[in-house]
Image (tube, rainbow, N blue to C red):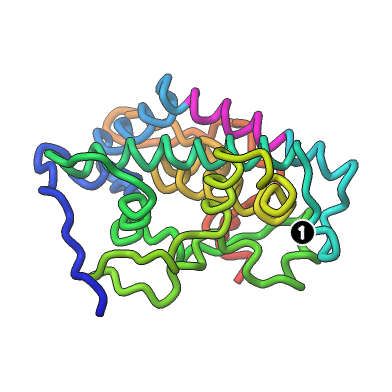
Amino acid sequence: MANPISLPSRNETLSDNECFYVEPDKNNFAELQKAYNRKVSQEANNLRLQYFSIEQELINSFKYVNPVTSNLNTSSVKFASIIRESANLFEQVSRIIYDKLFKEYGRINIFHYLTLEKFLKFNDLKFHCPSLTIIASENPNLLRPYGSLDGWNDQNQPEPVNIPSWWTAYNKIKHSPDALTDYSTLENSIQSLLASYIIINRYLGPGVISGSLLKPEDNAGEIIQRQITVEQSELFIDTLTLMGYVT
C-alpha cells in the first residue's frame, strides 16, 4: 500500500509565481516586470550558461555517435560527463524551487524532487525536436524524461519505480567507473539533458533557454512588451513555444 505524501510546511511568504514560473497577468506591469527581472538575473544567467554548455557537448557527440535507434544503448565517457552535468543541473534547480516552496525540511533527495510534479506538472509537457525527429518517433518515451511518473498518484509518496532511468544512471556513474559501460548511454544523455531543460523552463519560463524574452515597458499607461532576441536551445522546443503549431 502506498504511503500518503507528507510535504513540509508551505512557505507562505512566497506566492507560487515567486517559486516557479506562472504566466503573469499581461495587464499587470509589476508582475510582468518581476518575471522579466528573474529571467535576466545572475541566477538565470548562470543556469543558462550551464545548460548551453552541456547541450553543445551533446550536439558535438552526434558527430561521432549518430542519434539513431540502434545507437541508443551506445556508451561513452563523454555521455557519462553529459549525464553527470545534466542531472546535477536538474538537482540544482529542483533544490532552488523546493527551498522556495517549503520551510523547515531536512535532507532531501530524488523523491522530494519528484514531488515537485504536484506543482510543476513537468510530465505533461510535450516537445518538438527537429534533429531527433526520427529517433523520437521510433521511441515515443525518449522525449519523456519524467515518464516514470505515469500513474503516480500525487497524494502518495513517489516510489522507487518512479525514479527516472537517467537519474539511476547518474547515481551509478557517480559512484563507480565500472557503471560507465551500462549506464553512460546516448539515451540517458538525451533524457537527462531534456530533464534539465524542462525544470529550468518551469522555474523561469520562456526567454531563458528557449522562447521569447519579453521586456515590459509602461508607455503612458499602456503596457508594451518588446521581444528581445536570446540564445535558443538547438535541440528542444516545447509546444507552448511553438504557439500551437505542433500538436
- The picture quadrant where one finds residue 144 is bottom right
In x, y percent, where is residue 223? 34, 37
Of residues 91 and 31, the one drawn nearer to the viewer in this rendering: 91
Query: Badge 1 local density, few (<14 within 10 Å), some, or many (20+)?
Result: some
Q: Quadrant for the N terminus, please.
A: bottom left
What are the residue bounds of the magenta stretch? 45-56
Q: Quadrant of the C terminus?
A: bottom right
Pointer 1: what residue? 73
Residue at 29% across / 28% down in the picture? 220
* Membership of 48 in magenta stretch: yes
- Along the line of sight, which residue is nearer the eye, 21 or 177? 177
Q: Residue visible at 77% across and 59% down?
A: 72
Does 192 appear in magenta? Answer: no
Residue 104 coordinates in the image, percent (x, y): 12, 39
User: In the displayed image of the protein, which residue is found farthest to the top?
Assistant: 42
Q: Quadrant of residue 67?
A: bottom right
